[in-house]
Amino acid sequence: MNKDDNQVRVRFAPSPTGYLHVGGLRTALFNYLFARKHGGKFILRIEDTDQKRSISDALKNLISTMKEVGLRYDEGPDIGGCYGPYIQSERMDIYREHIHKLLDSGNAYYCFCSEERLTKLREEQRKRKRPPMYDGKCKNLSNDEVKDRLDQGMPFVIRLKYPKEGKTVFDDVVRERVAVDNSIIDDQILIKSDGFPTYHLASVVDDHLMKITHVIRGEEWLSSVPKHIFLYKAFGWKPPVFVHLPLLLNSDRSKLSKRQGDVSVESYLQRGYLPEAILNFIALLGWHSADDREIYTLKELEDVFSLDRINKAGAVFDIEKLNWMGGQYIRSLDIEYIADQSRRFFEEAGIDTSNQDKYMKAINTARDYVYRLSDIVEHAKMFYGELIFTEEDIRLIEEENSQKIYAYWIDELSRKTEWESEELSSLTKQSIAELGIKGKQFYFPLRLALFGNCHGPDIPTLIGILGRDDSIRRLKACLTR
């Protein structure tokens, strides 16, 4: 027996039609987690048979994004495997072989109807409020009629000859038992006029030949399962286990689509959301753990994920939840990692981070206030360059008490080259006592001079990041006003 016969094998099969959608990432993640949970294989397959919609560099971007978020596949177009090629446009001979088997067995047929006729047919059906379906005009053409039209070079497609009587009943892990009336199933096109297969033929053939055991995909494919089951039976193959994930919804419960807002994974990464936070957030869209935890590492998700905890109801893509989760990760992950991931945003802002000690301290302070890495710059840039004050700030700076505070701190800080945090805390208490200024009247002007804002970190932290010399320089700049 082949070692793959009893092994879980799942696939993520996107089309290279743009950037990776968050819905696609969820499909990839659930397949990945299921494979890892059961010691199986996770395969990346590219379904590019719709040549008109394929976009240059989309495959490169897709693979790059998958790797950036940490979803490592076991077989795929760039790493190979035992069941390749893993790009459908490179498997055309396989599809031609299998479509002829369907034609020979009477489970598929040539259709020579023009696009004009089909358009007119659909319009008439809409007027009669009937679902648009092919009327089967070419279904019963004789072999001689088919040969004659092929000899004439007439354009054609090849359709599935689906029975119209009875029902198709199948099991889905999420939807359980599903029954569909065969009369509403269209004679699906299997081979298009350009010779390329549609998703329906290619995915069934590839899933079988690649020994896929579980098809985990979006709910939008649920209505296509009867056609796929028919194809499996026509070829004499055993169907895989079907798992259809609930829809992703906007906050108004409309379907989350590529046309509504920015839903590409790459965009979220570019804006500074951590891959760990994105995966954790995506995992909880339509799935929940037994103990209702919310924060999981990828490894922890691999251990606890199960198909039976996938919800039927649509999952709302709540950006506020993602923001909260992003903040949790930024504050909890290793500071060296956060600093490394943040550096590009500082470089884009033109900030020199060569002083590593200062940079690390700035990151450690700023990360308490943000939920994405790009925002760290906004909360740390006041440690670099010149501060900009409003007219209201200047009025506070020029107050008599403020000037007393600045003069006192300049004098005291100048007494020593190095200051420890505990010493700065003692100096804070000492200056409050000696100046007789306390509360907001003390902290607001001092913090404003050092930080550019009345609100923020405590004084020892600010001076610890700036250093003694830069702190004195900023205080002097305010004193001379």
Image (cartoon, rainbow, N blue to C red):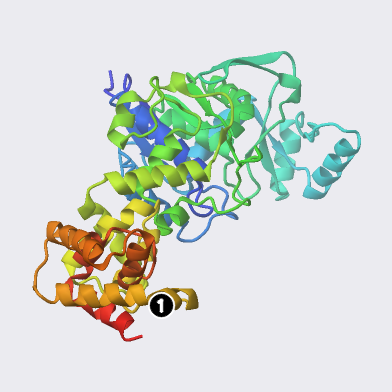
Residue 204 or residue 371, whichever sits in front: 371
Decide: few, some or many residues near mark 1? Use Cα within 10 Å; few <14, some 14-19, many ≥20: few
Residue 177 or residue 128, whichever sits in front: 177
Residue 478 on image: x %, y % = 33, 80
Residue 342 on image: x %, y % = 31, 60
Could you tell me which residue is drawn at 26 percent across and 68 percent down? 435
Residue 405 on image: x %, y % = 28, 72
Could you tell me which residue is drawn at 54 percent across and 47 percent down? 49
- Mark 1 lies on residue: 388
Image position of 284 (left or right of 191): left
Q: Is residue 11 in view?
A: no
Quadrant of the rendered image containing residue 403? bottom left
Image position of 328 (left or right of 16): left
Could you tell me which residue is drawn at 73 percent across and 35 percent down? 144
SS at circle 1: loop
Could you tell me which residue is drawn at 62 percent across and 23 percent down? 226
Residue 271 on image: x %, y % = 43, 58
Task: Look at the image and tell me in which quarter the C terminus lies.
Answer: bottom left
Task: Look at the image and tell me in which quarter the N terminus lies.
Answer: top left
- As drawn, 278 above or below 133: below
